[in-house]
Image (cartoon, helix red, strand yellow):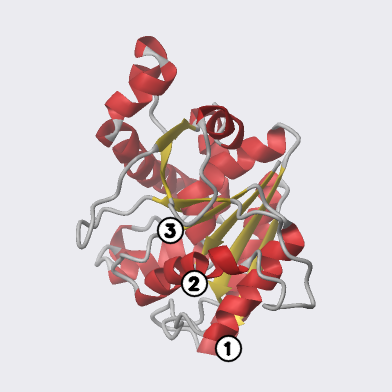
Amino acid sequence: MKLMMIGAHPDDADLRAGGIAARYVERGGEAMLVSVTNGNAGHQEMAPDALAVRRKEEARRAGEVIGVDYVVLDHPDARLTPSVEVREELIGMIRAYRPDVVLAPRPFDYHPDHRAVGQLVIDASYLLTVPLVRPDVPILERVPVIAHTYDGYTKPLPFRADVVVDVDEYFEAQCRMTACHESQFFEWLPYNGGILDQVPATEPERWEWHVERMKRRLGFLADKYREAFVQRYGEEHGRRVFCGEVFELCEYGGRPDAETIERLFPR
């Protein structure tokens, strides 16, 4: 089995779907993490060119944690649009990788790059099967299953948790992956959130600080969708999940039955 997670920025893919990607690899499948932009706007001090180089290296190291390729495309951060050119680039990548499932943000989000990626994946979906679009790359015989990663926005539609996945066993790996993005989790995001002064100075203290923040972030999803976890995993197991990932099936992708969902979103 193959999973492709397409995010807007380096760190989006591992933050939103690092657990399920790790599970694919552990069980003999494959996963590819993709950032459509180079992340060159996400810092309070660094110059864009130097930041792009740094963020690509951070992504490479994050991918190494679970043994996957982390591909960073060279589109400028904060300037991404759902253009024909980028759409056809993604069509070529998806066809070449031939994933069983594609994960991406919804086209409803606070960040224009996130919205653009969601729209790009939706727009690419049917065209994956059209021979005269990107004729240099063989078509897919059918559209893969597409699922959206979580967001908390309600306009025009709230997120619907169609599939929940317990990724407790990969929590440490996900923390290690995201911690590789030092420019984000220890610099830019704390600065942007007004808590840069809370970032510890030493590496061991920063790790503990990061783990606690990840517990709150991923634990929030497990708590919010607790009943869905209970329904899928049973009462005892579902109640103790603390690290969850949730996905909304996209109607423009393949329509999976219950057996296919179990295969593509393994417990």
Residue 190 x %, y %: 33, 64
Q: Residues within 10 Å of mark 2 (few under 14, many from 20)?
A: many
Residues tagged 3 and 1 counted as in contact (Cβ below 8 A) = no
As drawn, 119 above or below 224: below
Q: Quadrant of the C terminus?
A: top right
Q: Callout 1: 10 Å neighbours few (<14), some, many (20+)?
A: few
Image vertical order of residue 250 relative to residue 126, above or below:
above
| Three-letter amino acid code of the residue under disc 3 | Ala
Three-letter amino acid code of the residue under disc 2? Leu
Using the image, determine if residue 157 lies above or below residue 67.
Answer: below
Residue at mark 2 to residue at mark 1: CA–CA distance: 25 Å
Q: CA distance from mark 3 to mark 1?
A: 26 Å
Residue that numbered label 1 is attached to: 49
The part of the image, by quadrant, that contains residue 238 is top left
Q: Residue 82, which numbered label?
A: none
Q: Nearer the viewer, residue 262 or 76?
A: 262
| Label 3 to label 2: alpha-carbon separation | 40 Å
Which amino acid, mark 1? Asp
Q: Which residue is mark 2?
A: 120
Residue drawn at (29%, 39%) of the image? 220
Query: Quick one: SS at disc 3?
Result: loop
Residue at which label 3 appears: 201
Q: Earlier in the sequence, mark 2 or mark 1?
A: 1
Task: Identify which residue is drawn at 49% across, 70% down.
Answer: 123
Q: Position of residue 165 (x, y in %)?
A: 47, 33
